[in-house]
Image (tube, rainbow, N blue to C red):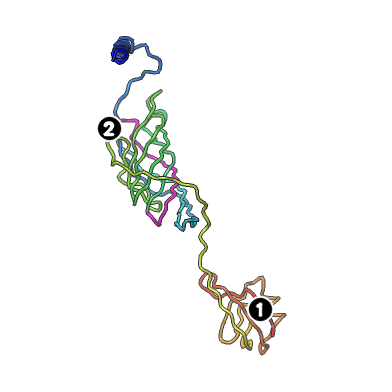
Amino acid sequence: MRKLTFAIAGVIALVATSIAVAHGIDGAKTATAVSGTFAAAPSGTVTTRSCTTTDNKSITITDAKYTGTADSSNADLKGAITLRARSVINTTDGVGTVNGAYRIDVASGGDTVGAFSTVYDHGTIAGWTAGRAHTPHAKLLGNLSATFAANTGFAGGKIGGGTANGSALELGPTSCKPAKPPVEKSEARGTVSAISANSITVAQLTCAIPSAMSAGVNAKVKQGDRAEIHCTVVSGQNTLTRVEKR
């Protein structure tokens, strides 16, 4: 009990001293609440790739630039906004992350710049942002939220001003394999009923001949020969991959 009393007394003394000398503490700075809104749509190339994890989850990774407008009663958060973001979304479960950086072109002087790291949950993001405000020597720290889709951008964005509770994720170790599109193949064996520089027909299967193969195929088989052809669908068209004379 005596130790507790001394501890409480020590805390009270420390608080009192802190109040008395607060103006002289190194690193103490003023804090001002700020808030703003923003919206931004894709600008330029949107790069998207997909893969499947070892636990059979479909992952879509998108890198893109988004441009739009930020608005606020605070001049530091008002102006044209450019965001560069990478979204990594588990499309199987509808969750993921959206991280990046932004720049707000304020009316005069230096721009406001910052980075953000957010959790994505079924079309909405919520997380934090940190950066440097247009006002000289002012740091920016707060919440950032919005609705988000990689192909349409940010809508209803907020910097500060209150935000939804957001979501939490566990990001575990795993590997991710690029998704392989289905390959449509066909083959036929029989008489070559038609052949030209551009196509070959065997047993009613007609396949386009790639220009790089044309001379070799036409030197190898002629109309009336028996042959076996193997074809793969390329851009919606059966395309020859191999021919063997029988």
Q: Is residue 95 above or below residue 134?
A: below
The region drawn magenta spans 74-93
Q: Give the residue number, with chain letter if any, for mark 1.
A: 243
Q: CA distance from mark 2 to mark 1?
A: 71 Å
Amino acid, disc 1? Val
The label on residue 73 is 2
Nearest the eye: 244 or 19: 19
Residue 88 percent coordinates (x, y): 44, 49
Classed neighbour count for the residue bearing mark 2: other residues with Cα under 10 Å, few (<14), some (14–19), many (≥20): few
Question: From what the image shows, is residue 168 above or below residue 246?
Answer: above
Q: Badge 1, how many Cα within 10 Å: few under 14, some, many 20+?
A: some
Element on which disc 2 rests: loop
Residue 58 lies in magenta, yes or no?
no
User: Residue at point 64% right, 78% down?
Assistant: 197
Helix, strand or loop at label 1? It is strand
Rendered residue at 42%/33% (across/down): 113
* Nearer to the camera, 67 or 28: 28
Q: Nearer the viewer, residue 74 or 121?
A: 121
Whole-percent x and y of residue 94? Answer: 37, 53
- Give the image location of residue 122, x and y in percent: 34, 52
Expressed as whole percent of the image width and height from the top left, the position of residue 231 reads 59, 76
Q: Quadrant of the C terminus?
A: bottom right
At a point 40% along the width and 15% down the height, the residue shown is: 26
